[in-house]
C-alpha cells in the first residue's frame, strides 16, 4: 500500500533513497520472501516501510491463513502482497491511478496469486453493493484529506467486514481517527509522520444494543 499524495518528511517519503533496490518492492516474509516486485515511478508512491510491515505481520501471524483480504488505496500493494505471501487465500486491490493499477496487475500476474485488481477509487468501490465479506482490510489513504473516518464507516455500514474482521489503518501521526464503536484497538505502531492502528471487529451479541 501505499500512495500518499501530500509530501511527507524524507524519512517516510523517499523510499528510493532508503532502499537498495530502486523501483522495487521487497516482500519480507512467507513463500515469496525476498521477492522483488517492480513499482512504477509515480509521485507519492512508496511501500509501507519494512519495519512497520514486519511489526504488523508479527501481530497477524496466526490470523492470515485462508483469509480474504481487501487492500484499499493499494498503491504498491505492499500489504496485500505480504498477506498473500504469508498464507492469505485471496486479495482484492483497489487503486485509482491507471499507471499504478497496471503495475499492480503485472505483479499479480508475476506472482500467480489469487487476486483481483479493481481500478477505481476506494469511495466508488465501497459505494457499490458489498461482495462476500473480508476478514482482513488494509487502508492507507492520502494523508490530511479526511479519508479515514468515512472509509471506516463505509466498511462497517456496507457489509464489507466479517464478524471478527481485522482492520489496519495507516494515517498521519497527529490524527485520532473516528472508527465504528464495534472496532477495538488491538495494537499501534508509529514511524515518522505515520501512525498505524490495528483494530479487531467485535460486534455486539445478537439483540444487543449498538
Image (tube, grey):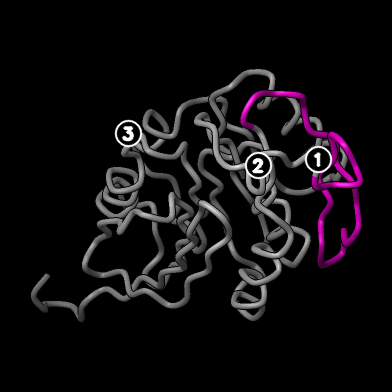
**Which residues lie in the magenta part?**
18-44
Look at the image and say whether residue 169 sits in the magenta stretch: no
- Element under disc 2: helix
Tag 1 residue: 17
Look at the image and say whether residue 31 sits in the magenta stretch: yes
* Residue density around tag 3, few if under 14, some if 14–19, many if 20 or more, within 10 Å: few
- First-in-chain label (2 vs 1): 2
Q: Which mark is residue 10?
A: 2
Mark 2 touches mark 1? (CB < 8 Å): yes
Viewed as shown, does residue 145 lie left or right of 17? left
- Residue 12 in the image: state x and y as whole percent: 63, 47
Front residue (pair 93, 113): 93
- First-in-chain label (2 vs 3): 2
Tag 3 residue: 127
Placement of the C terminus among the 4 image quadrants: bottom left
* For discs 2 and 3, the disc positioned in front in the rendered view: 2
Amino acid at each position: 500500500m501505499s500512495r500518499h499524495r501530500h509530501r511527507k518528511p524524507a524519512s517516510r517519503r523517499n523510499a528510493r533513497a532508503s532502499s537498495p533496490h530502486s523501483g522495487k518492492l521487497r516482500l519480507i516474509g512467507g513463500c515469496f520472501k525476498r521477492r522483488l516486485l517492480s513499482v512504477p515511478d509515480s509521485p507519492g508512491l512508496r511501500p509501507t516501510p519494512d519495519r512497520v510491515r514486519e511489526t504488523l505481520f508479527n501481530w497477524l501471524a496466526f490470523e492470515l491463513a485462508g483469509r480474504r483480504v481487501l487492500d484499499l488505496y493499494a498503491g504498491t500493494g505492499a500489504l496485500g502482497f505480504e498477506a498473500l505471501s504469508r498464507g492469505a487465500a485471496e486479495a482484492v486491490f483497489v487503486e485509482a491511478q491507471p499507471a499504478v493499477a497496471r503495475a499492480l496487475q503485472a505483479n499479480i500476474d508475476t506472482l500467480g496469486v489469487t487476486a483481483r485488481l479493481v481500478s477505481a477509487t476506494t469511495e466508488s468501490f465501497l459505494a457499490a453493493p458489498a461482495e462476500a465479506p473480508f476478514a482482513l482490510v488494509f487502508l492507507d489513504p492520502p494523508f490530511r484529506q479526511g479519508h479515514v473516518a468515512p472509509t471506516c464507516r463505509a466498511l462497517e455500514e456496507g457489509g464489507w467486514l466479517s464478524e471478527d474482521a481485522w482492520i489496519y489503518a495507516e494515517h498521519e501521526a497527529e490524527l485520532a481517527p473516528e472508527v465504528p464503536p464495534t472496532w477495538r484497538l488491538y495494537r499501534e505502531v508509529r514511524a515518522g509522520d505515520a501512525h498505524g492502528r490495528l483494530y479487531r471487529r467485535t460486534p455486539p451479541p445478537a439483540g444487543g444494543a449498538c
